[in-house]
Image (cartoon, rainbow, N blue to C red):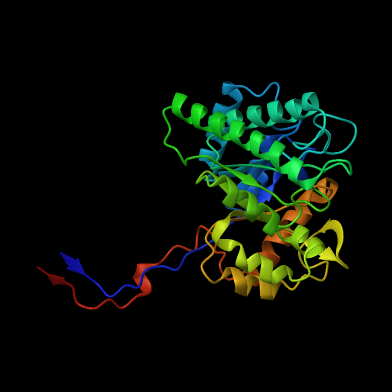
Amino acid sequence: MLETALTPAAPRARLAYNANGMRSVSLDEAVRTLADRGYDGIELSLNAQHVDPWTFSAADAAHLRETLAETGMTACSLATGDPHLLSEKAFEPALVDPDPAERARRLDLLQRSVRIGVLIGVPLVVFSTGTRRPEVSAEQADVWLDEALAVLLDTLHETLDAAGLPRGSTVLGIEPEPGFHCRTNADVAVVLERTGSEDLWLSQDLGHCVVEEEDALGSLSRHLPVTRHLQVEDIADRVHAHLVPGDGDVDFDAVGRALADGYDGWISVELYDHDPVHRDAARRSEEFLREHFPCLVRPSDALDLSSLELPAATVR
């Protein structure tokens, strides 16, 4: 046996960019643009431009996997939060809509999303609960949400089994959203505990946390153990408008210190309204976050053994 005194590498997070901020270009071009910029991955977005839930095919998935392989990129997540997939009214219908037919429409969309996610091979499919109407109690909304989650988990397991893939290769994530039934990390954590599934996780959004929570950094840190994915953007004055990191008042150095304490999941920039300037937004975000998040390293920053003075090897 060859023994050396190398110290194991610390956990590292990887950086992605959400394709919902690049809708003016093809998905193929989005992948290549981000690879050239130095990103590790791309967060896919369910929308008519890139991943259309009604037309996306096995051939589309195969082409995407080829592009990812050519560029060394990873599709880290499939986000399903496009506001107008089902209605001209943003994010309607919700999973907690009082009309069962409307809840069924949202559930059908998310089932399609789960099947597409497995087809592509993403490790995570992310969704939100939607808004709870004033006439609906929180308790009733929880009942409807739990029913939907049971169906989605069954769909996930059936799809993985049919594809011959192991459980856990794709999981589900709930993202808190300002004004939604689940609007904070703690709201989602309660759902995770109630459900008790190893295939259901929290997908945090830093900006949403800043907008909704008085102790955003504390909430971020407390919920990292149940977090599979983190979206980031800057926020100014706790107004829900996504800004390029560095353009608002979020303390990214403090966030970076919190993440450096062992977070090794994906960090994805979400700038859905920066499409006209997506190249500049992607460049600035990548440069800023790698400077302020010590947990992030470029793929090229692999350990170079040639510069190390190794102790004499001992052979047994």
> Residue 84: image x %, image y %?
84, 34
Q: Quadrant of the N terminus?
A: bottom left
Q: Is residue 280 above or below residue 163?
A: below
Which quarter of the figure has residue 307?
A: bottom left
> Residue 227: image x %, image y %?
59, 56
In the shown orientation, is residue 176 left or right of residue 266?
right
Q: Quadrant of the C terminus?
A: bottom left
Q: Is residue 121 above or below residue 53?
A: below
In the shown orientation, is residue 2 left or right of residue 193?
left
> Residue 174: image x %, image y %?
66, 47
Report the residue at 75% width, 33% height from top. 47
Report the residue at 69% width, 21% height from top. 55
Report the residue at 52% width, 39% height from top. 170
Give 285 or 131, whichever is nearer the viewer: 131
Which quarter of the figure has residue 95?
A: top right
Give 143 or 237, whichever is nearer the viewer: 143
Q: Is residue 180 above or below residue 244?
A: above
